[in-house]
Image (spheres, rainbow, N blue to C red):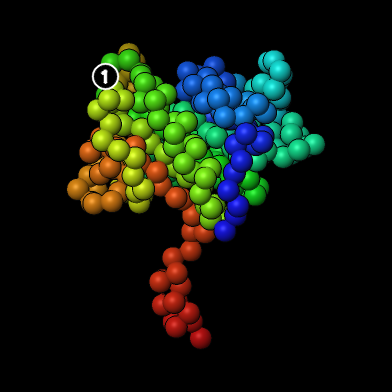
Amino acid sequence: MAERIDLARARILVTNDDGIEAPGIKLLTRVAKAVSRDVWVVAPEVEQSGASHSLTLHRPLRLRKLGPKRFAVDGTPTDCVLLAINCVLEDKRPTLVLSGVNGGANMGEDLTYSGTVAAAMEATLLGVKAIAFSQVVGDTGPLRFACAAAFAEKVLRRLAALPWADETLYNVNFPNLPPGKVTGIVAAAQGGRKIGDHLIKRLDPRGRPYYWIGPQRDDERTRRGSDVRGISEGKVTVTPVFLDLTNRRALGWLKKAMP
């Protein structure tokens, strides 16, 4: 169990998967600067949504300085965290990595696809505490971050005041609601939210088929205690994500089956 974070003395790295100019990272940078004077931003040049925990291995990476403590990388969110911790901040590693605020939910199986969560995972693997933030959005209408703006600092301060479990990051989702209609902040388990089952087939002008991957299906909206259920009830959800993917129960069966 790691010690609590003194935010006033913390070096904070902010990153995302929506790109260096995305509104969510600008919001998260403001939140970071409200609690610390030592805030750095290293994020992808362009949007990398759905990049998951991918690395760029077959070409060189470029790191471009945009201003004081602000850099863009022509790679994935994982690339950004690697370069930030091992190159940009090699003189003094960050105390905390904040990823987001993503424009869209990261609940259930979204975690396996999410570049936002992957950035936090990479930081955790490198021994740095990390939190991923995502703003749930509607199917139509403009992207609004009012809920994230109202609650992100509060959630950050609460988590920083807690002991930090090893190999664990926190995944935070804000509901698509005006701040005054949020019903609370809750600890939640990872729910079920599968993407990819709804494929939309269309034809291009030359009659050749192409496909859109449709929206997620919420499988566990009624499962009490899940992030999907919490969001449906108008709550901000906080999920501790453990990086050891071993199924301990299945491991016990497997050991008995192996000679």
Relative to 113, say whether 104 is above or below: above
Query: How many other residues sit within 10 Å of disc 1, few (<14), some (14-19) or many (≥20)?
Result: few
- Whether residue 197 appears in this view of the structure is no
Closest to the observer, 242 or 46: 242
Which quadrant holds residue 86? top right
Q: At x 28% / y 31%, what residue is drawn?
A: 182
Amino acid residing under circle 1: Thr
- How many marks on residues? 1
Q: Is residue 92 left or right of residue 202?
A: right
Residue drawn at point x = 44 percent, y = 37 percent: 155
Apparent side of residue 231 relative to residue 36 in the rendered image (left or right):
left
Q: List x then y, in percent, for residue 229.
A: 25, 44
* Residue shown at 44% from the left, 77% from the top: 252
Q: Considering the numbered disc 1 on the image, is that residue within a helix, a strand or a loop?
A: loop
- In this view of the protein, which residue sits in the foreground, 45 or 100? 100
Q: Quadrant of residue 87?
A: top right
Residue 15 position within the rendered picture, expressed as x and y whole percent measured from the top left? 57, 30
**In the foreground, 27 or 214:** 27
Query: In front here: 139 or 124?
Result: 124
Reading the image, the residue beneath label 1 is: 140
Q: Is residue 92 above or below residue 166?
A: above
The answer to whether any part of residue 183 appears in the image is yes
Q: Looking at the image, which residue sits at the far left?
A: 222
Q: Residue at x 35, y 51 (%)?
A: 189
> Is 217 on the left or on the right of 151, as rendered?
left
Q: Position of residue 17 (x, y in %)?
A: 52, 29
Q: Position of residue 23 (x, y in %)?
A: 47, 18
